[in-house]
Image: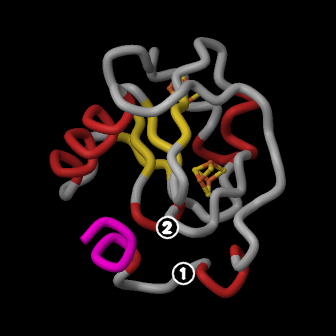
Amino acid sequence: TYVVTENCIACKYTDCVEVCPVDCFYEGENTLVIHPDECIDCGVCEPECPADAIRPDTEADSDAWVAFNRKYAELWPVMVQRKDPAPEAESHDGKSGKLAAFFP
Ligand code: SF4
Ligand code: F3S
């Protein structure tokens, strides 16, 4: 599976949702997540994210992100249409500590 990681938080560019062939992105107030059981591993969303927030689960720290994505995908509504990014997206892009700040 692919997962959405920390740099999506407070950026939410939403370019990713338009390309997913199985509509497995889910929207929270401050970030999106991918449902790991629905993702077919096609990889097309990864290069679409301007914040480089989408990663394959083969990366070292991915277990926690898979759990995070699964948890919220089961709580949040599906998102299939792009919308404006978060209001302060540019200033939040690349900042550290967003997970702790927005998901205390
Ligand atoms: Fe959707 Fe493909 Fe991205 Fe998985 S890898 S979330 S199926 S676009
Ligand atoms: Fe987030 Fe990137 Fe999609 S910032 S909403 S994962 S395009």
Count of labels shown? 2
Q: Is residue 1 visible?
A: no
101 inside magenta stretch: yes
- Residue 19 placement, left or right of 103: right
Q: Position of residue 63 (x, y in %)?
A: 16, 45
In the rendered view, would you say 29 is above or below 95? Answer: above
Do the residues bearing badges 2 and 1 touch, measured as CB atoms within 8 Å? yes
Q: Which mark is residue 42?
A: none
Q: Residue 76's image quarter?
A: top left
- Residue 62 placement, left or right of 34: left
Q: Earlier in the sequence, mark 2 or mark 1?
A: 2
Which residues, given as a range, are shown in magenta?
99-104
Q: Is mark 2 within 8 Å of ligand 2?
A: yes
Q: Residue at x 71, y 56 (%)?
A: 13
| Residue at which label 1 appears | 94
Q: Foreground residue, 59 or 22?
A: 22
Q: Residue 51's image quarter?
A: bottom right
In the rendered view, would you say 73 is above or below 60? Answer: above
Which amino acid type is shown beneath numbered disc 2? Asn
Q: Secondary structure at mark 1?
A: loop
55 inside magenta stretch: no
| Residue at which label 2 appears | 7
Which amino acid type is shown beneath numbered disc 1? Gly
In the rendered view, would you say 33 is above or below 23? Answer: below
Q: Secondary structure at mark 2?
A: helix
Q: Main secondary structure of the magenta part?
A: helix
Q: Position of residue 86 (x, y in %)?
A: 70, 65
Quadrant the C terminus occupies: bottom left
Q: Position of residue 4 (x, y in %)?
A: 44, 48
Q: Is residue 3 visible?
A: yes
